Image (cartoon, helix red, strand yellow):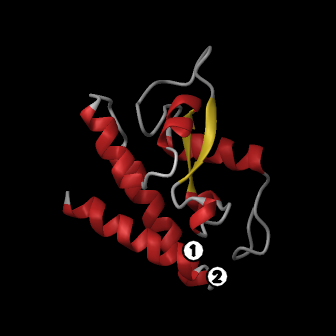
Amino acid sequence: MSVEGRHQPGAAERLRLALDRDGARCVWCGRPFAGLVAPTREHLVPRAKGGPSWLENEVAACRRCNAERGHRSAVEWLEECERRGWASDVAAVDRSLTALLDAIARRGGNRRARLYAEAQRRRLRRR
């Protein structure tokens, strides 16, 4: 699969691995992926904020949640999902943020993504 970040699987493979890791449900709203509810790759640290397209930075989300989240942070969107009464998978988000920080520590670089992920993890754990 990956040799310390030198080679990442393709987008479709990363989505499959995220589904295997987190389950076949949207991490934000909890809807199962079936029929019209198709999974998409969602970056916890957005690409615009320096987030890499690594498995550790991606979770499976439905199209609705992926589109509605927009530029909101992961924790901000989790809080909105909870206000809406959705069954968010907070543990999966926390695991992915932790895995991303570990991957950045091993591979180096990605300073912007590291700072963003650290802030999100702190905020998530304070809730």
- Residue position marked by numbered label 1 in the rendering: 103
Whole-percent x and y of residue 114?
50, 76
The answer to whether the residues at label 2 and label 1 have Cβ atoms under 8 Å apart is: yes
Q: Nearer the viewer, residue 46 or 22?
A: 46
Label 2 sits on a secondary structure element that is helix
Residue 102 in view (yes/no): no
Residue at the top extreme of this rendering: 35
Residue 69 in view (yes/no): yes
Q: Nearer the viewer, residue 22 or 48?
A: 48
The structure residue drawn at horizontal position 41% and vertical position 30%, both measured from the top left corner, is 30
Whole-percent x and y of residue 20?
58, 42
Using residue 107 as the reference point, say whether residue 113 is left or right of it: left
For the N terminus, the image quarter is bottom right
Q: Which mark is residue 107?
A: 2
Using residue 84 as the reference point, say whether residue 30 is left or right of it: right
The structure residue drawn at horizontal position 32% and vertical position 29%, both measured from the top left corner, is 86
Circle 1: residue type: Ala
Circle 2: residue type: Arg
Q: Nearer the viewer, residue 40 or 107?
A: 40
The structure residue drawn at horizontal position 48% and vertical position 34%, both measured from the top left corner, is 26
The structure residue drawn at horizontal position 56% and vertical position 24%, both measured from the top left corner, is 33
Question: Is residue 108 positioned above or below 17 on the image?
Answer: below
Q: Which quarter of the picture shows residue 116? A: bottom left
Question: Is residue 87 positioned above or below 74 on the image?
Answer: above
Label 1 sits on a secondary structure element that is helix
Using residue 32 as the reference point, say whether residue 110 is left or right of it: right
Q: Which mark is residue 70?
A: none
Q: Residues within 10 Å of mark 1 (few under 14, many from 20)?
A: some
